[in-house]
Image (cartoon, rainbow, N blue to C red):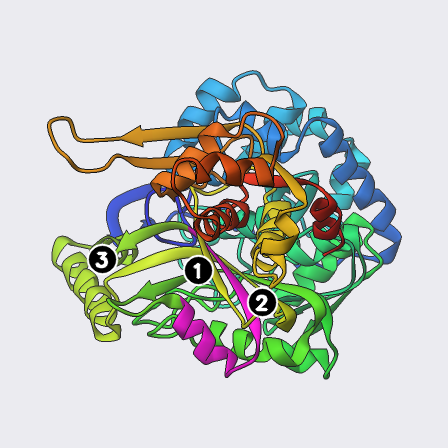
Amino acid sequence: MPNSPQRAVSPVAHGSSLAMKAKSNRGVLQPVTVPQPVTERASFLVDRADLPGLRGAVSKLANAGYSETVVTERLGLQDLADLEWRSVPIYRSERLAGRDPLALAIDLFLLQGDLPNDELERLFSRSESDLLVRAGLLAIDEMGLARARASLFPVGDRLIFSDHDWPSLPHPGYTTVPTDQVMGIGRDSRLLARCTSRRTFRSTLDLCTGSGIHALLASAHAQQGLAVDISPRAARCARFNAQASGATNVDVAVGDLFDAARGESFDLITANPPFVPSPLDSLRFRDGGRSGEDVQKRIVAGLPHHLAPGGMAQIVTELGERDDEPLAHRLRDWLEGAPMDIHILRLGEYSAAKYAIGHAKGDDYQAFLDSTRQWADNLRAQGYIRVVSLVISFQWSDLTCGPPWEHLDESPPPRRAAGAEIDAAFLAERFTRRRDLPQALAQSCLRRAGPVALLDARVLGSDMPRRAKATLLRQALTIEHHLDPLEREILDRMEGRIPMPHLIGLFRDLLVDEPTIIAATRSLLRRQLVRIDGQLADSAARL
């Protein structure tokens, strides 16, 4: 959510014949009454005989460069999640003025523009255009203007069809968001895609699947996957994407969360549930009840019954935060005592006031103020002082490493794959909780885990101790770790490979006892600022 905590915003359709009036309805511009063509939404149904041609047309777009990295660069963005509808005229005039096939594809399938016949013919052959019309993905009006009936979102090297990300602004045929809208690929979806573990799994389950994006991404590293959504239209969209991509190891079911799993367990469970704490119930894919927790707490409560041993469950969400209540306590309550380890990745936050303003709607100033008050009153009733953006990961605890734990990291949203780093965080936390770690360290050597940015801060003219922060570089997650003076000195002195007995002797000469040195080293290992060479490194790899 780049500028406001909403799950959908809207671009203006290029070349649309819609005349717009300045007055708005609930904050959304409305068309005047002018006869015009109406573009129906995609049906997400395709005849089996058309599947090879559909896959060929999608491959043609991919070969033109229609991928997340290339499209992001072409639009001049740092992250495709930063796409804003208000900038669509700028994208078109400055980034897509050269009307090559990639520019045409971006305009048609991402910016919800329209293409005249001569541009459409440069993008697709006549037979390909006819096929896309039959497949319900393209509409051509009597003037020869082609409009996409669904968006095609690039996610990594995958291309995913879904309903337009912004149906409520002036795309022909829409004045309000349909109740069965399938959520587009926005910031939340991209965060989960980047943070999901990409280890090889036997079976996967994607809840609240929407377009099926996370089930399809997991299909590349799993034997079998199940995608579930309570919306029949969303399930149809997910099945359509599986067919279009040729994924044969993904099943799609309509159902209420785990009901469709029929008691099965899974090695990877992902979910991007409705999580907005809303005083309304207007968007099925967005609103999670007044607390925002109606769906997600049911998902967490179901994990002990459906997560296989050694598996991973990962949820992208927003949670309201209260004073003096750690989020981990709430998650523990939802787990109802199940012994699971929890990694919480904090990716941003919004004050309650900003969150309320970001969601408020109104067709005049007073209506907007009333809407803001409605949202703010609801957040206040829940006791929320802020709303935080999170990716939460769960694994079964290894009781040989002590009781279940929670680990909190904070980072700007990653722009590339970070799943392996979350896997490593679980490994490091468990490894440093081994009861025999102090004895085993004595037989090992240490070194920095990689290039580390070390920042010192002190107040000149004051006797306040300096404060140090360290960040491991070349990572997708930029995590700042606060260091105490001993941790800072150990990290600073660790040039190359250093035997642990030598490190202990070095600081013993500075009157630091061995248990204190071990505790500081354990802390650096847990935060992955240092790593182990030697006997213990092989043990860590096996763990």
User: Which residue matches tag 1?
Assistant: 177
Residue 361 in the image: x percent, y percent?
26, 57
Residue 519 in the image: x percent, y percent?
47, 52
Q: Is residue 303 above or below residue 326?
A: below
User: Which residue matches tag 2?
Assistant: 208
At a point 78% along the width and 36% down the height, the residue shown is: 59
Whether residue 190 appears in this view of the structure is: yes
Pair 2/3: label in front: 2
The answer to whether 371 appears left or right of 410 in the picture is left
The residues colored magenta run 328-346
User: Which residue matches tag 3?
Assistant: 362
Residue 48 in the image: x percent, y percent?
86, 57
Does the magenta segment cover residue 189? no
For label 3, the SS is loop
Q: Name the amino acid type tagged 2.
A: Cys
Q: Earlier in the sequence, mark 2 or mark 3?
A: 2
Q: Name the amino acid type tagged 1.
A: Val
Q: CA distance from mark 1 to mark 2?
A: 18 Å
Q: CA distance from mark 1 to mark 3?
A: 16 Å
